[in-house]
Image: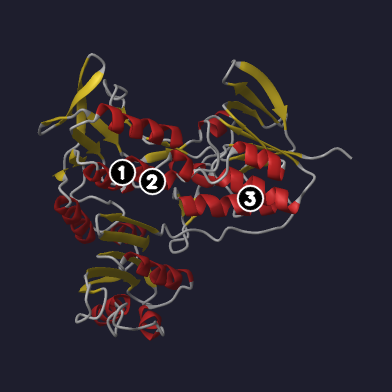
Amino acid sequence: MAKRTLVVIGGDAAGMSAASQVRRNDPEREIIVYERGEHTSYAACGMPYLVAGLVDRPEQLVARRPEVFRERQNIQALTHHEAFEIEPQGQRVRVRRLEDGCEFWQSYDDLLIATGALPIIPELEGARAEGVYALKDLASGIALTRYVQEAQPRRAVIIGGGYIGIEMAEALRLRGIETALVHRGPQVMATLDVEMGALASRALTELGVTLYLGEALVGFETQAGRVRAVVTAQRTLPADLVILGMGIRPNSDLARAAGIPLGVQGAIRVSPQMQTGAHHVWAAGDCAESMHLVSGEPVYVALGTVANKTGRIAGLNLTGAPTAFPGVLGTAITKVGETEIARTGLQTRECERLGIAYTTAQIASSTRAGYYPGAREIAVRLLAERATGRLLGGQIVGGPGSGKRIDTIAAALTARLTAQDLVDMDLSYAPPFSPVWDPVQTAARVLLRSG
């Protein structure tokens, strides 16, 4: 009996998680992974820290090299190979070997699309000039790091105040680079309510980042092919380094061209088992949509945690172990200097869009008992359904020791607990770690009174 062949397009988190899971469950299956770039299984979230100099070498961000997959797991991880056409009816993929341009068709029994996401690059003259960078893959992070080290830019402008924007702002300030951040919203971090976003904006300002909020990018000024300034409707900002942090989109063009159904924000529509609308075709990671655990709606959430989990789920189902991916909350955490920022579940504007009658509470507390050395400020914001008290979302901004408290809220959301349930939780206490009432529970108490 001929071996079944699994072809994977994309060699990072979702693709290699799926391939590894299939190999664990099926030692005999032929597994071929096509990766356009030169790296497999790398920590994309670590790239700002590489730029900052906190990570010494790019190799430290690579979890497993292609040759390791080949030698230890018999997974044919082929880098510099671009899959550029899918033919679902014929169950084959057209591939281009980038080193020599050779093209060939590869047949499959099952196909997993794990093509990830692409940075949004504006259609403006100068957007691709020298000195303008968008983090797409590890190679782009290495190129940016090299530019910072060799060109030694003095003034940088970051476009966008999301996760990439604020993490890169911190990285550049650590390098001693004068940094400005342009963001079209009233506060950075659109995944937070405005009140909490204001705290994140304050943290950036305290780090020495100049903020231009409520301003949109209009264009770039260049000279001899190099960027010289960023132009908004209000001002021109000189720059010899520009970083585009304007968001990402699912890299689903290959699926779209093949007639594979797409869903929210152009992400590939999948079942809880990660199956697409085409026979024998699966999708996972940043190119695929998910289901929100609170709203029940399909959503697009591009996070490394989700990519690894959905890749594993795809691998289990590809080997006949029926497993459903339950969904996401969009739980995320980052930091600016010593200020930790975290969020999970729904935020105010999402509740309003969904027509959910909600109540909210925001409190200020301390990370430790007030008398214990090192206590820092922490703000916690909770949302709950007005009629039932069921928790809908939470946000945290505060000093060291604040951010990971978001996991308590995420667990409560997953279990569909109420604010009262959160108050009743038997959480740990000692002065070096928390006040007697943990700030998360204090917020829940205030939420109960406001409802």
- Residue occupied by mark 1: 52
Q: Amino acid at mark 1?
A: Ala
Q: Amino acid at mark 2?
A: Val
Rounded to the nearest whole Å, what is the CA distance between mark 2 and mark 1? 8 Å
Q: Residues within 10 Å of mark 2 (few under 14, many from 20)?
A: some
Whichever of labels 1 and 3 marks the residue nearer the N terminus, that label is 1
Front residue of this view, candidates 345 and 37: 37
Residue extending furthest toward the front: 56
Front residue of this view, candidates 20 and 182: 20
Front residue of this view, candidates 4 and 72: 72
Residue 103 spot, x, y in % from top left: 64, 18
Q: What secondary structure is found at the residue carrying circle 2?
A: loop
Residue 113 spot, x, y in % from top left: 59, 39
Which of the 4 image quadrants contains residue 126?
A: top left
Which one is closest to the eye, mark 2 or mark 3? Answer: 2
- Residue occupied by mark 3: 314
Which numbered tag is attached to residue 55?
Answer: 2
Residue 51 spot, x, y in % from top left: 33, 40
Q: Are marks 2 and 1 in contact (CB under 8 Å)?
A: yes
Residue drawn where x is 31% and y is 39% of the image: 245
Q: Amino acid at mark 3?
A: Ala
Rounded to the nearest whole Å, what is the CA distance between mark 2 and mark 3? 32 Å
- Looking at the figure, which quarter contains the N terminus? top right
Which of the 4 image quadrants contains residue 106?
A: top right
Residue drawn where x is 21% and y is 46% of the image: 185
